[in-house]
Amino acid sequence: MATHYLWNLSVNREPRVITLNHTDISGGAARAAYRIHHCLRSQGIDSRMWVNKALAGDWTVNGPVGKFEKAVKILRTQVGGQIRHMLKTDNPVLHSPALLPSRWPKRINESNADIVHLHWVGSEMLSIADIGRITKPVVWTLHDMWAFCGAEHYTEDFRWRDGYRRDNRPAYESGFDLSRWTWQRKRKHWQCPMHIVALCDWMRKCVKESLLFRDWPCHVIPNPLDTDRWSPLDQRLARDLLHLPQDVPFLLFGAIGGDRDPRKGFDLLAGALSCLRSEAVAKRLELMVFGQLETEKPPEIGFPVHYTGHLHDDLSLRILYCAADALVLPSRQDNLPNTGVEAQACGTPVVAFNTCGLPDIVDHQTTGYLARPFEAEDLAAGIIWILQSDRTKLREQSRKRAVERYACKTVAEQYRRVYAEALESAG
């Protein structure tokens, strides 16, 4: 029966897909999931997006149905916050226990969908038990580490490799072991293998080393991008539109909250800029920061800084990328940040550390520079290398790589193969 079902799909129609994410366009994971959803649709795959919070006003996106689900959404946030307070940890990232149930599994299982495509769902959308109750084939794109960790969305320790035992708890935690309790619930409820999609090779290696997912199928597929929309503009025009001077080198740094997230490494960028103060090539250097407004006491980095705040539309961000000479991604830990992909599609080279998912974005000394982790001096050397290089050639190479890797047609075809594999194995 399963073979006949798959044959019908392959001959008569594309699979019907439910794309599930907490929101549609708020946050990096949401924007990536929304782009995947529309990438699939643009290539003839019938994707519908279901979210807890619909903000785009898009008819292909549906929010929760009924007062019950809306009330549970509020309660889930409050209960999660109370449980998190029982944990004392120096890990500053979000911890999600994913405890309260929802009606999403019932709605999913009663739908006519062939595939359920999960994204960022474990914080305020689905409980761990909810995910286990989905009876349709599941494909899960990982935008962070939460799925195979405990409650942490990112972590630098390795309990996820060995299992969350009492004897391997990190010294920086005390109180209720939220991550161990959360991981145990995942192991209990997730008995049926899901098809995991990693955005980069680093995340794939983490998945294959994790005790929870190591025996499950895992594929590497980058986030797609509309490379016609995200395309180069003349740099002089971009700077005119932003009222920026033409004759100075500009660097760009961006993150939600700007310099407040230690994972994003603004302090390492500041250290690199300190190394550049005596360099002639950087004498008139200026920095643009998007994702936050200027704070009451902005950091002194020795160069002029322009703060754009949070940019709410793609066109403004595209102009910003095109105005810059380079985007700097000094992250200590990152998956496949949208900013790096967007910048390259606009022809802007990227300077980053050679860690996590960043080597999947930067082809060293071809589309940017990969510095030794986490050496501010080598990050500075990368910035100098960009400023002294043939930037026209760098821009052309960056654009070419982005089109080859992230174009919707390329990414959708990779997902089409994963969906077929998931349907076949489910039979």
Image: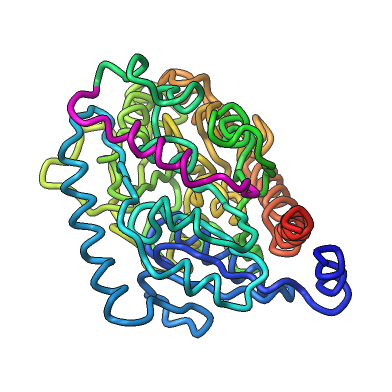
The answer to whether 143 appears left or right of 76 in the picture is right
Up the image or down, 207 lies above or below 34; here it is above
Residue 135 in percent (x, y) is at 58, 62
Q: Is residue 237 one of those drawn in magenta?
A: no
Q: Is residue 28 left or right of residue 6?
A: left
Image height check: is 7 above or below 84? below
- The x, y position of residue 163, in whole percent, is 46, 25
Q: Quadrant of residue 205?
A: top right
Colouring chosen for the image of the structure: rainbow
Q: Quadrant of the C terminus?
A: bottom right
Q: Residue at x 32, y 51 (%)?
A: 99
Residue at the extreme left of the image, as rendered: 296
Tell me: 344 left or right of 105.
right
To which quarter of the image does residue 25 belong? bottom left
Residue shown at the point (26%, 67%) measured from the top left: 72
Estimate the x, y position of residue 85 in percent, counting from the top left.
Answer: 15, 40
Residue 184 part of the magenta segment:
yes
Q: How many marks?
A: 0
Q: Is residue 61 above or below residue 325?
A: below
Rendered image quadrant of residue 202: top right
Image-based side of 3 in relation to 197, left or right: right
Residue under the point 65% across and 30% down: 364
Instruction: Write down the region rendered in magenta.
Output: 173-195
